[in-house]
Amino acid sequence: MGEYQVEEVVEFLAGAGRVAVLTGAGISAESGVPTFRGKDGLWKQHKAETLATPEAFERDPKLVWEWYDWRRGLIAPVEPNAGHRVIAGWERLFGEMAVITQNVDGLHAKAGSQNVVELHGNIWKLRCTREGTVEEVRDNPLPHIPPVCPNCGSFLRPHIVWFGESLDPVVLDRATDLSESCQVMFVIGTSAVVHPAASLPYAAARAGAKIIEVNLEPTSLTPHANFFFPGKAGEILPVLDRQLREWTKP
Ligand code: BJW
């Protein structure tokens, strides 16, 4: 990490009142949650179309639920890492600070972040396919697969946005507003290929925000970012945080 880059970023941050952080699977990788793409990604072992689409659920709800139940089991014991913790601490540092996450693992909230926008839902929430009611169910493993609504007996589904499904418009509006009003946007651990999430940094940049990207490798966003830190989020964010706290110390 270039020292000059760190200093410049810290200078921006110290003067910023409104900060937004867009995260993807990479922020949770160091906690042990697999990412989607890449060599060890979830999509290498399972085809997205056979599991994360409404058609897949209609065809075989049991198969889809077995996959989600397995992932719930994987995520349940996992703890937030240094990256999540730095981001949570920034809520006390900046006037306005929000996390916009594509992740469904709930780890930002577990780390203490309170202002979290979950673009793609949450793996701990189940939704009735008939009534649309949403409730948090932590049972692990689920006692019955596929689970059914206690009220009407219809299948429950994961409260997650699958390919081809629209994001909740209220959630997307909030994420867009935050993107368009922040002064600095961090984009951390996302391959930046899934829309509309991948469009948010561009909306932020158009509205005048500085874009700071943290990723193991460059993405299609990198040439458009003001700063790019190659490496692990759990290592880079603590360095930035330490410098920032030094800088802003009274
Ligand atoms: C590290 C690290 C470390 C590792 N430190 N970094 C416009 C153009 C083209 C297509 C579309 C478009 N608008 C909509 C679409 C269609 C589609 C889409 O975007 N397709 C693209 C793939 C082309 N979008 C949708 O269908 C969305 N719906 C929608 O827009 O509705 C309206 C509409 C529909 C159809 C057509 C047009 C309009 C919904 C998208 C829902 C995404 N859902 C998923 C699955 C959830 C299921 C589940 O979790 O079970 O959400 S897909 C999957 O990808 C998951 C993630 O949230 C999402 C993003 O992945 P992410 O987080 O970026 O992870 P990875 O694995 O890709 O990347 C990890 C990164 O971390 C890598 O870069 C690593 O290098 C890095 N990394 N370790 C730092 N330690």
Image (spheres, grey):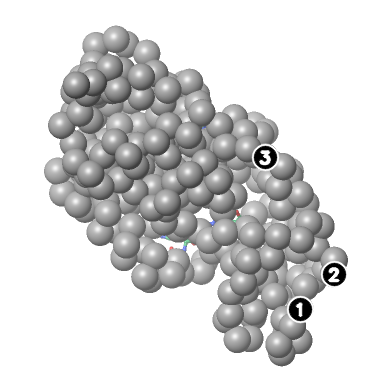
Amino acid beneath label 3: Val
- Left or right of residue 79, residue 189 in this image: left
Residue positioned 74% across, 83% down in the render: 150
Residue 56, compared with residue 189, is above or below; it is: below
Image quadrant containing the N terminus: top left
Residue 47, compared with residue 220, is above or below; it is: below
The reply to whether residue 91 is visible in this rendering is yes
**Residue lying furthest front in this view?**
250
Residue positioned 34% across, 48% down in the render: 98
Q: Position of residue 174 (x, y in %)?
A: 32, 62
Q: Where is residue 178 in the image (x, y as percent from the top left)?
A: 27, 54
Label 3 residue near ligand 1, CB within 8 Å: no
Q: Position of residue 170 (x, y in %)?
A: 36, 70
* Marks 2 and 1, how far apart at CA: 8 Å
State the residue position of label 2: 144
State the residue position of label 3: 78
Residue positioned 55% across, 46% down in the render: 110
The label on residue 148 is 1
Amino acid beneath label 1: Val
Amino acid beneath label 2: His
Residue positioned 56% across, 32% down in the render: 81
Count of numbered labels shown in the rendering:
3
Q: Do the residues labelled 1 and 3 touch (CB within 8 Å)?
A: no
Among the 4 quarters of the image, the one containing residue 220: top left
Q: Are marks 2 and 1 in contact (CB under 8 Å)?
A: yes
Residue 77, compared with residue 53, is above or below; it is: above
